[in-house]
Image (tube, rainbow, N blue to C red):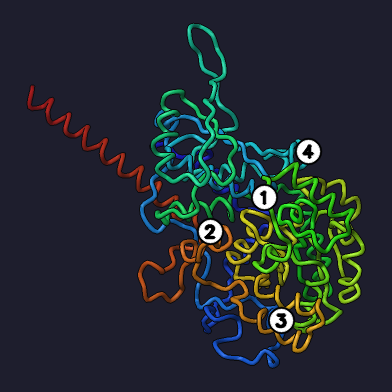
Amino acid sequence: MRRGPGGEASLRRRRGPARLWVAVAALVAGTICLSSSSSVGLFGASYRVQDVDVNKLWRTADSNGWRASSAPRTYWPPPPTESESSGYLRVRCNGGLNQQRSAICNAVVAARIMNATLVLPELDTNSFWHDESGFVGIYDVSHFIKTLKYDVRIVMSIPEITANGKTKKLKAHQIRPPRDAPVSWYATVALEKMKKYGAVYLTPFSHRLAEDIDDPELQRLRCRVNYHALRFKPHIMKTSSEIVNKLRSEGHFMSIHLRFELDMLAFAGCIDIFTPHEQKILLKYRKEHFADKLLVPRERRLIGKCPLTPEEVGVILRAMRFDNTTRIYLASGELFGGKRFMKPFKAMFPRLENHSTVGPGKLEENTQGLAGSAVDYMVCLLSDIFIPTYDGPSNFANNLMGHRMYYGFRTTITPNRKALAPIFIDRAQGRSTGFEQRIRQVMFNSHFGGPHKRIHPESFYTNSWPECFCQTNARNHADRCPPDNINDVLESQFQSEEEMEEARMTNQTDSTGQTEEMMI
């Protein structure tokens, strides 16, 4: 078998990442392994909420001896050579940055299932973000290809072919994959089309591969893509590093993703707290962009489908006894309703920042569109505490929670909107007795980003435990940790494959020689 592109030289060149990349990687190796179980929350099985020390939340969550590892646990054959490939796979990833990120992971897994060569995924940047940066403008392409060279063969574009004396680009047959398609669909329907046409183009490609896959090695491949191969470009990493260093220069800081934006509020149908004019705007947007469906705001709120308002976030933090000196980084788009909704939050927590206020000079030039979302992503990933106000499938918060869990069980405070809804409704109607105590009871009944069983509808991208984790002192053999360096594991298996092939060829040669001697 041939060694992947770059061979040993590319492995040597990988050993010199920039400072921030070293820091991020160190989070994996430096996962703090605490002894108490995380299945019942950060503070143990029994506690009184009035006695909880909120300062403990600035630490990482209890790991119970688990640490991140997406290295293969079983034999993992190398990707096909050019002559062995089933064909070329093109995908067009639609949606926002993190929906596209999930789609990229799915595309790599799909290529692996089909034994195909993956064409660098296309990002639908223009329709959503109105920019043209694409994959090459956001991610480090060479790092992406090198990191996955033992998993899939990746090319920049479909090659040209020569037929009847004419050279032209191979045309990919377009297919619309079913939503949450099973592995079997890629191994049969899509593969059959690929073998027939030589290349297939899957579009749209959001949520087009089922998250629940029985093969844990394919799930670990998803983690290798998401948490190792997908690295933002140097200018995004540099900007993010400068912001994090500035925020941390004064101690701990938390990040909050406020999903209080026009598209989300219109989608959720949570319009009752807005003025009649604002409601018209929301209803118009909903009619133009989403399926026609009757939504009752109060009912939506009671089942936890409304994003928290900025004021509600402030009230929750105050009830948890964070004080007004807490430094907060806000990651969000343009908030709907503007200053009217931010004013009470800022009165409670005045030390609010975003990438425009805390970033280096001329930051805005580097943080438009997808790049701006990428900077927010990195700052939130490295913050001491992260709080999402809405966590829907494949969105910013959903992916970040999984990423923070992978990089050392970093504390995530996830408000249970359904449990909080009746408390806030009672408060709005004047029934505020025991209000803060009730909030604290809800908020401290959480795993805070520690390892916990994934229960539907929780996404694999939010919680990749246990597939992408291992236990340092495991009693169960399946939970034991492989070597730390993923590339070492894959390299050794790749070399084993080469040695087996060489041995097979040697045996064939010996056998042929013996036959020739007998014939003589």
| SS under mark 2 | loop
Q: Is residue 468 above or below residue 209?
A: below
| SS under mark 1 | loop
Residue type (three-letter) at the residue carrying disc 2 = Phe
Residue 207 location in percent, x, y? 56, 47
- Depth check, mark 3 against mark 4: the one in front is 3
Q: Which residue is mark 3?
A: 439
Report how far apart the C-alphas of labels 2 and 1 lie in the structure: 28 Å
Q: What's the mark number on residue 293?
A: 1
Instruction: Rate crowding at label 3 as few (under 14), some (14 to 19) or many (20 or more) other CA atoms within 10 Å.
Output: many
Report how far apart the C-alphas of labels 1 and 4 lie in the structure: 31 Å
User: At 40% across and 46% down in the image, what residue appears?
Assistant: 494
Residue 108 location in percent, x, y? 52, 43
Give the mark nearer the N terminus: 3 vs 1.
1
Query: Is mark 2 in CB contact (under 8 Å) with mark 3?
Result: no
Query: Is mark 4 in CB contact (under 8 Å) with mark 2?
Result: no
Instruction: Rate crowding at label 2 as few (under 14), some (14 to 19) or many (20 or more) other CA atoms within 10 Å.
Output: many
Q: What's the mark number on residue 131?
A: 4
Residue 443 location in percent, x, y? 67, 79
